[in-house]
Image (cartoon, grey):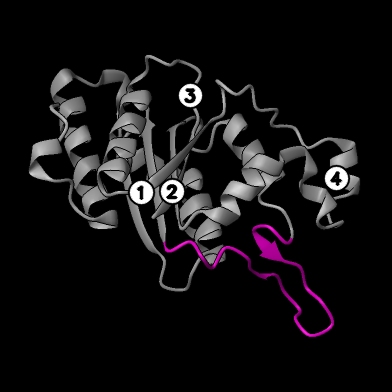
Amino acid sequence: MRAVVVYCHPDPASFTAAVRDLVVHHLQEAGATVRVHDLYAGDFAPSLTQSEWQGYLESPANRAPVAEAADDLQWCDTLIFVYPTWWYGLPAMLKGWLDRVMLPDVAFLMPDGVNKTIRPGLTQITRLGVFTTCGASRWLTFFVGAPGKRTLLRGVRLLCAKRCRTAFAAHYLMDSSTPASRKAHLARVGRKMARLIGPVPQRAQVQA
């Protein structure tokens, strides 16, 4: 198993970091080779520049500014996003990662003389996980439309293998969370990961 974890949070001591650590633990115990892309720690620049936009379709030169991330995206068979939901959607840093890394001939194939629409380019990805926290309630998030979840589990999912397995878990009402609710959420993330990649051996389970 070859896993890429895209992690986006400005505070290394956040609860989101604990979720990331649990996700990585499950992957490693399952024998996966794991590459973590910590967008804030790596000072990722989320804005698509004018030169990148102008060369957007010029493959393979278009991947040069984000070569490591693009290479890892094509290398992995398991892709997992860990982030906080802000304004019901993806943090700007993570949305910018999608803009700059999910490129033509990396994540998708452009229309051509035969095909009138884009086609999936990440068909080697068979597992897609999304783990987030939300300040809003579940009801309010879904009333607004959960755009962050939809972008990843519908938009990105369409670029992956046809039978790509997915996992999702969100801690809603994060601003009024308690030690008990956070512990319960970590347990939920563990169960979701077990379904996605297989259970962690009993001896290696993380103590909540």
Q: Earlier in the sequence, mark 3 or mark 2?
A: 2
Which residue range is magenta in the image?
Answer: 105-126
Residue 91 figure quarter: top right
Residue 152 drawn above or below residue 87 = below
Residue type marked 1: Ala
**Magenta span has 56?**
no
Label 4 near label 3: C-beta < 8 Å? Answer: no
Label 1 near label 2: C-beta < 8 Å? Answer: yes
The numbered dot on residue 32 is 1
| Secondary structure category for the residue under label 4 | helix
Q: How far apart in space, not on screen, are marks 4 and 1 (Cα)?
A: 35 Å
Residue type marked 3: His
User: Quadrant where the N terminus lies?
Assistant: bottom left
Please state which of the two labelled residues, at mark 3 or mark 2, is closer to the viewer.
2
**Number of numbered callouts drawn:** 4
Q: How far apart in space, not on screen, are marks 3 and 1 (Cα)?
A: 23 Å
Q: How far apart in space, not on screen, are marks 3 and 4 (Cα)?
A: 26 Å
- Residue count near mark 3 (Cα–Cα under 10 Å), binned few <14, some 14–19, many ≥20: many
